Image (cartoon, rainbow, N blue to C red):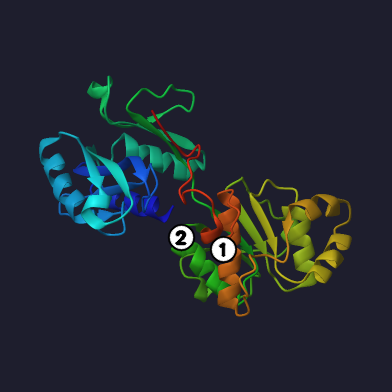
């Protein structure tokens, strides 16, 4: 998600100007990035995004300059087996776009409304007169020689608690391009939270809280009464992830305290919050929690990659090629 956020920043700086958008549209064998990954290149050669581990970007930027100048899109095959000794091939479609064009407007709309969108990239075939990327309806048919790629709104991380142990959690979330909101007591000093949104909350159970499937909440006030009040409210909302810091014994006491909502909370709650990575320090605990949120949001099993059978980038509904 951070890449898309950075692409929008670059596009805004070049509103009304031509740029080049490079997209991985096919892969064979191993690839560093998955189908649908994008890279945005400005006329001055600056870029956002990466389509490889660094071995293809220089050539892509060079080709992008020609695409920006002529407006003619190109489909470029890269055989990394022959060129770099890797075990795969990728095809990259490079097209000219406007900094404030339809593709950028689709991203802006997705980020602003937090609604899922779709982008169709036509890169070859009978639809050659339509070569390029367009926002489309999820119900539209995918023509041959095209890639349908889903656009997800960024994760919104809501942290209930403004203690020092929330600082690394805020930092990690922002480094991933997540929107981060800290619900803190009015008297707390929140200067260490950088550009996170700070919302002073006096009575947690009276504050209306928007939530959706791309919103993750972590309760970590370290005050039993406030934790119970936040839990009582949050368990009724459609969070994609709901975590609670602390041991299981404390969780059981909290479930007793929230009464009728306990059964639902027991099913939805991730407690102790985080993956088992041997975390001890606040920074390590933050890493464990962010990793668990990422796994939940991507429907991943969070195991060791060495134990995975098949490719790392498994085909999913996020990108469909015809």
Q: In percent of the image, x 73 and y 71: which residue is there?
A: 246
**Which residue is pictured at 72% across the width and 66% down the height?**
272
Q: Nearer the viewer, residue 14 or 292?
A: 292
Residues packed near mark 2 inside 10 Å, few (<14), some (14 to 19) or many (20 plus): some
Return the disc, 2 or 1, that comes first in the chain's sequence.
Answer: 2
Q: Quadrant of the C terminus?
A: top left
User: Which numbered circle lies on residue 176?
Assistant: 2
- Contact (Cβ within 8 Å) of mark 2 with mark 1: yes
Residue 177 position in % (x across, y down): 45, 58
Give the percent coordinates (x, y) of residue 50. Answer: 31, 54
Q: Which residue is mark 1?
A: 290
**Does dot 2 land on a helix, a strand or a loop?**
loop
Q: Is residue 277 visible?
A: yes
| Residue 142, image x, y percentages | 40, 24
Indicate the quadrant where residue 231 lies.
bottom right
Query: CA–CA distance between discs 2 and 1?
Result: 10 Å
Q: Tell which of 317 and 72 is nearer to you.
A: 317
Answer few, some or many: residues within 10 Å of disc 1's Cα (few below 14, many 20 plus, some between 14 and 19): many
Residue at the extreme top: 126
Residue 201 occupies quadrant: bottom right
Q: Is residue 99 visible?
A: no
Total numbered circles: 2
Q: Residue at x 44, y 64 (%)?
A: 175
Query: Toward the viewer: 123 or 255?
Result: 123
Q: Is residue 9 above or below residue 185?
A: above
Residue 190, relative to residue 118: is it above or below? below
Side of 85 where 322 appears, left or right: right
């Amino acid at each position: 998600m951070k890449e898309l956020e950075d692409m929008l920043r670059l596009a805004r700086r070049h509103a009304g100007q031509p740029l080049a958008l490079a997209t991985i549209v096919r892969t064979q064998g191993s690839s560093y990035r998955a189908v649908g990954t994008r890279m945005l290149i400005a006329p001055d050669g600056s870029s956002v995004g990466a389509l490889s581990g660094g071995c293809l970007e220089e050539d892509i930027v060079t080709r992008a300059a020609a695409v920006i100048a002529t407006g003619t899109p190109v489909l470029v095959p890269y055989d990394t087996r022959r060129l770099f000794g890797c075990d795969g091939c990728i095809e990259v479609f490079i097209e000219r776009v406007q900094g404030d064009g339809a593709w950028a407007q689709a991203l802006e709309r997705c980020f602003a409304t937090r609604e899922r969108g779709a982008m169709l990239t036509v890169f070859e075939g009978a639809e050659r007169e339509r070569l390029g990327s367009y926002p489309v309806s999820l119900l539209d048919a995918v023509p041959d020689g095209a890639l349908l790629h889903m656009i997800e709104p960024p994760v919104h991380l809501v942290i209930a608690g403004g203690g020092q142990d929330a600082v690394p959690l805020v930092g990690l979330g922002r480094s991933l391009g997540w929107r981060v909101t800290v619900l803190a007591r009015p008297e707390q000093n929140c200067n260490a939270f950088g550009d996170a949104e700070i919302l002073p909350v006096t009575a947690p159970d009276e504050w209306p809280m928007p939530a959706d499937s791309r919103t993750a909440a972590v309760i970590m006030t370290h005050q039993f009464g406030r934790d119970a009040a936040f839990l009582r409210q949050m368990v009724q909302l459609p969070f994609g992830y709901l975590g609670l810091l602390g041991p299981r014994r404390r969780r059981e006491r909290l479930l007793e305290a929230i009464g009728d909502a306990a059964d639902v909370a027991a099913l939805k709650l991730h407690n102790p919050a985080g993956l088992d990575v041997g975390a001890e320090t606040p920074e390590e605990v933050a890493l464990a929690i962010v990793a668990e949120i990422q796994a939940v949001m991507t429907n991943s099993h969070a195991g060791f990659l060495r134990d995975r059978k098949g490719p790392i980038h498994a085909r999913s509904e996020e990108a469909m090629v015809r």
